[in-house]
Amino acid sequence: MPAIEKISARKILDSRGKYTIEVVIHSKSFKTAACAPSGASVGKFEAQAFPEGGVESSIQLLQNELSPKLKGMNTEDQTEIDKIIWKFDGTKNLSKIGGNAAIATSTAVAKAESKSKNLMLCQYLGSNLRLPFPLSNVIGGGVHTKGDSIEFQEFLVLPLGAKTFEEAAKTNIMVHRAVAEIIMKTHPNYVLGRNDEGAWAAPLTINEALETLTKAIEKVEEETGVRAKIGIDAAASELWNGRKEEYVYKKENKRLTSEQQLEYVLDLIHNYEIAYFEDPFQEEDFEYFAKLTANTKNRSIITGDDLIVTHKKRLQTAIEKNAITGSIIKPNQVGTLTDTKSTVELCHKSKVIPAASHRSGETADPALAHIAVGLNCPIIKIGIMGGERMAKINELIRIEDTLKISMSKPPI
């Protein structure tokens, strides 16, 4: 249990070329570092990534004011350290020091303690470890994709039939490649590009994207025998016009009431056997999340991201209203590992599927892989291409090889 001598921080660049923070815990024997990602599709209820002064303000506060408060504390005191971070900040959404500074500090502390115990971070965080299924963005749209993009933010693949994580990761890569081949045949004059998360950006409608992904999954399943299913992240808060109370699909040239949105989503789930559907309604609409969940039963994991933002209280509300069967877990939405763990524990207690998730602006820090395994999340939303995504994928392959642990039970 190393004692904290000081905390330092620096500005680094995320995968979008925007500044984020790296925090370093200094002890007598060694140093450990953790980085925080940043999101583009940000829920209104999540922690504020940085204060008004940006990354520089977070760094100054952390080094000059928080560091002295944590000096001398043992890294095994994770819960107490995380409480001090919140007390020091003194706001409801970490707007003083910034949620990114908070989670990077909290994670660096956990890394220090696991290192002192000669454990992998996932071993330190939990027990009865299993590997998650990678849920990966294949065709991109929404705010993660520039230009005339598809309204839905992500069209995903979930390789539920994979027996190992390595096989699951390989399956997703094969689907990604097969999608490119199909798009190049249907749009031979289009220069195919990738978006913030490495998903293909293409001039498709929602139905065309789903048809393309269906064909790619079928092709890969024929080659490998690995069963895979489609997932969607609609990021519907980005489509919602609150003033007129309707979902606006500019490219599709349609406007839907909440009831029409419900029918539309149900049709998509039925027609394309969608196993995972994230944020089908705007971030305050527990009522229509609940209506969708009641109508899908065990056919699809109805998942809240902007609805929950990894906050235990919002998760509790969703559970009481029977609004979801899955919850996205983004540690920097809620601020510390203690808060993250508490939310995941409520998921497990309430039979809600926790899906650990990256952000669109990522770093090469592989901690999310360990958080997913250590907290027993059966799904990790992780991407397919790009070094910042591959850092987590390869870390999960290392965990699998080192610890010889099995895959989670398929969540659906």
Image (spheres, rainbow, N blue to C red):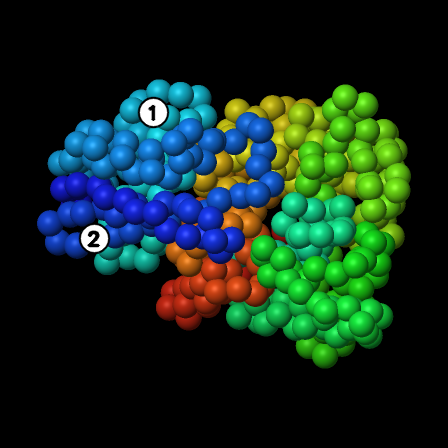
Whether residue 84 is visible to the viewer of this picture, yes or no, is: yes
Disc 2 marks which residue?
31
Q: Amino acid at mark 2?
A: Lys
State which quarter of the image contains the N terminus: top left
Q: Position of residue 84 (x, y in %)?
A: 28, 27
Relative height, residue 212 to residue 174 (above, below): above
Q: Amino acid at mark 1?
A: Asp
Q: CA distance from mark 2 to mark 1?
A: 24 Å
Foreground of the two, 316 or 208? 208
| Quadrant assignment, res 69 | top left
Q: Residue at x 28, y 31 (%)?
A: 61
| CB within 8 Å, label 2 to label 1 | no
Question: Which residue in the rendered view is the most extreme toward the bottom?
Answer: 223
Q: Position of residue 388 (x, y in %)?
A: 47, 60
Q: Which sits earlier in the primary sequence, circle 2 or circle 1? A: 2
Disc 1 marks which residue?
89
Q: Residue at x 25, y 52 (%)?
A: 32
Element carrying mark 1: helix
Q: Residue at x 81, y 74 (%)?
A: 188
